[in-house]
Image (spheres, rainbow, N blue to C red):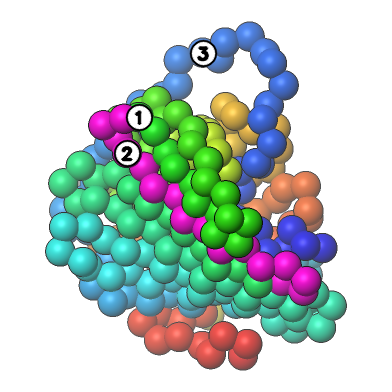
Amino acid sequence: MSHLAFLAPLLALAIDTNPAPTAAPPAPPPPAISTALNPLPWSDGENLTYIVSWNGLDAAIGAFSAHDKGDHWEFDLALASRGTVDSIYPFKGYFWSLMNKVAWRSTEYGEWRFEPHRAIKERTQIDYAQHQGTREVWSEGKTKTFPIVEEAVDDIGTMLYRVRAAPLKPGDTHTLYVYESDSEKQGEVVCEARETRAFGIWPAQPLLRVKATPTVGTHRRGHLVMWMTDDARHLPIHAELEFRYGTFDIALTQIDKTLPIGH
């Protein structure tokens, strides 16, 4: 049950933290997402609130927010258990990510996460000149370093925004390079279709169906399917996540207003 707090990265892409077994070298990946829409689909202060259900049970509430810091964006996520899960295993967390504007790449990711009998406080920073990541685990008094091969990578907090910013159309396939848990990993993003669907409080409208799958550096289990509005905002209004801990449904319930954490 402790892995329910892993919902933060799951709201973007489920990446397994364990290394994959040794295998033959993979085929060359599709091109990375290197371009962004102009203007970006979000504005300073945008706030998106999601309700998460786990195997049909009320599980969590999460609020993503975007903040323009001049030379970079800061993306924050406040997350807390609710409903049935909150009565069984209450948790809450705050996660932040920094993304440079000019180089359009992630430079920092951190989290303060609290579970029964456990607290995780850490920050990871990327030095592209040295091709190195430094992970400071404040809750354990440890500092670790790991190599970064690519010239631009994401973290588990910026992935959602990079996908939103990409000028996707059906048939497009891209690779995401992600640093997480002392290593660089990869995921594949495919824009599968343009379709008209209704979800929850959202009426039927044109949507882009995007599927994200962990690949290199993971156990290659699970996937995330996300439906974004096919308009200038690329709002992710619904997502379905399947991985080893079960099935999650993630529904957008508020825009630019936040339901109280714990609501």
> What secondary structure predominates along the stretch shown in magenta?
strand
Give, as a three-letter code, the residue at label 2: Asp
Q: Quadrant of the N terminus?
A: bottom right
Depth order, front residue of 215/248: 215
In the displayed structure, 217 sits above or below 9; it is above
From the image, tell me which residue sits under label 2.
127
Give, as a three-letter code, the residue at label 3: Ala
Q: Secondary structure at mark 3?
A: loop
From the image, tell me which residue sits under label 3.
27
What distance separates the C-alpha of mark 3 from that of mark 1? 23 Å
What distance separates the C-alpha of mark 2 from that of mark 3? 28 Å
Crowding at label 2, few (<14), some or many (≥20) Cα neighbours within 10 Å? few
In the picture, the disc for residue 131 is 1
Q: Determine which quarter of the picture holds residue 133.
A: top left
Which residue shows up at 38% across the image and 38% down it? 153
Discs 2, 1 touching: Cβ within 8 Å: yes
Depth order, front residue of 103/208: 103
Q: Is residue 206 left or right of residue 222?
A: left
Q: Is residue 186 left or right of residue 126?
A: right
Image spot of residue 22 (x, y percent): 69, 16
Return the residue found at the far front. 141
Residue 123 at least partly seen: yes
Q: If you read the primary sequence from the N terminus, does the residue marked by circle 3 or circle 1 appear first?
A: 3
Depth order, front residue of 117/160: 117
